[in-house]
Image (tube, rainbow, N blue to C red):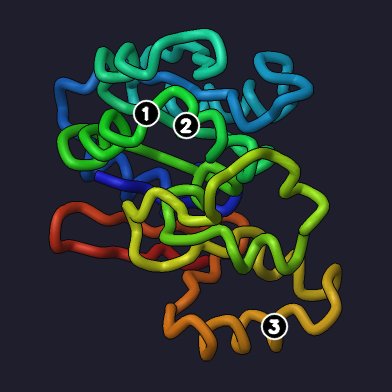
Amino acid sequence: MLVLCSDGLTSPALLQAVREKLPQNAAKAALVVTADRQYKKRNHHLPVDQAQLEALGLAVELFDLDHEPAEALLDYDAVDFIGGNPFYLLYAIRKKQAEPVLSRLAAEKALIGWSAGAIVFGPTLELIREYTPEMDKFPLPSLDGLGLCPHPVLPHYSSFLGRFERFEERCRDFEQRSSLSVLRLSDGEGAILDGDERKIIRI
């Protein structure tokens, strides 16, 4: 199961949808802090993120790909990637050659990503680079994402409408150029991909 969120499992509807899909014997979750290069395990969102996972009946451990082997993530029933810099997160994932591990987690367990964590699971970071080119400062061979979701993910959609000039127009232009359909998610919303089943939770 792959869960894509804007700002985590922050709405009752999204939390309940994940609870219904999570295996009853799921017991342990990893909260991956790698995308936040500055604060890591001191990220101010972590208490809320941890509480959300605990509400699903999961014991939570913090995890950083920069210092721990990607294969260790397979020991968890759910793995949740927090927000931060998507370009750095993608760089770290590629550096640790973690793509096969994440693909297996999405297929066999629960892989959750919000904000930057959701962005890297899509097919490309090109749209995000158009809005925030200053974040792209790492030696990536390409802006190809992991491709676990066929749609580029655009989190914090309603919040960013007034922050970036021509925000929606630029998104539509990208869709036309790339022939990709962007998954726009506002805070509290998410999408669940489980095999051939896809469910989008709106608020």
Dot 2 and dot 3 residues touching (CB under 8 Å)? no
Say few, some or many: other residues with alpha carbon within 10 Å of mark 2 (under 14 / 14 to 19 / 20 or more).
many
Q: Which residue is mark 3?
A: 170
Please name the residue shown 75% across and 78% down the image.
Answer: 167
Q: Secondary structure at mark 1?
A: loop
Dot 1 and dot 2 residues touching (CB under 8 Å)? yes
* Three-letter residue code for mark 3: Arg
Q: CA distance from mark 2 to mark 3?
A: 28 Å
Quadrant of the snapshot with the N terminus: top left
* Three-letter residue code for mark 1: Ala
In primary-sequence order, the first of circles 2 and 3 is: 2
Q: What label sits on residue 93 in the rendered view?
A: 2
Say few, some or many: other residues with alpha carbon within 10 Å of mark 3 (under 14 / 14 to 19 / 20 or more).
some
Picture quadrant where residue 130 is located: bottom right
State left or right for residue 27 relative to residue 24: right
State left or right for residue 87 relative to residue 16: right
Q: Which residue is nearer to you in this view: 22 or 37?
A: 37
- In percent of width and height, residue 179 lies at 43, 85
In primary-sequence order, the first of circles 1 and 2 is: 2
- In percent of width and height, residue 135 lies at 76, 48
Please name the residue shown 54% across and 55% down the image.
Answer: 143
Figure check: 4 above or below 113: below
Q: What label sits on residue 98 in the rendered view?
A: 1
* Three-letter residue code for mark 2: Ile
Q: What label sits on residue 7 in the rendered view?
A: none
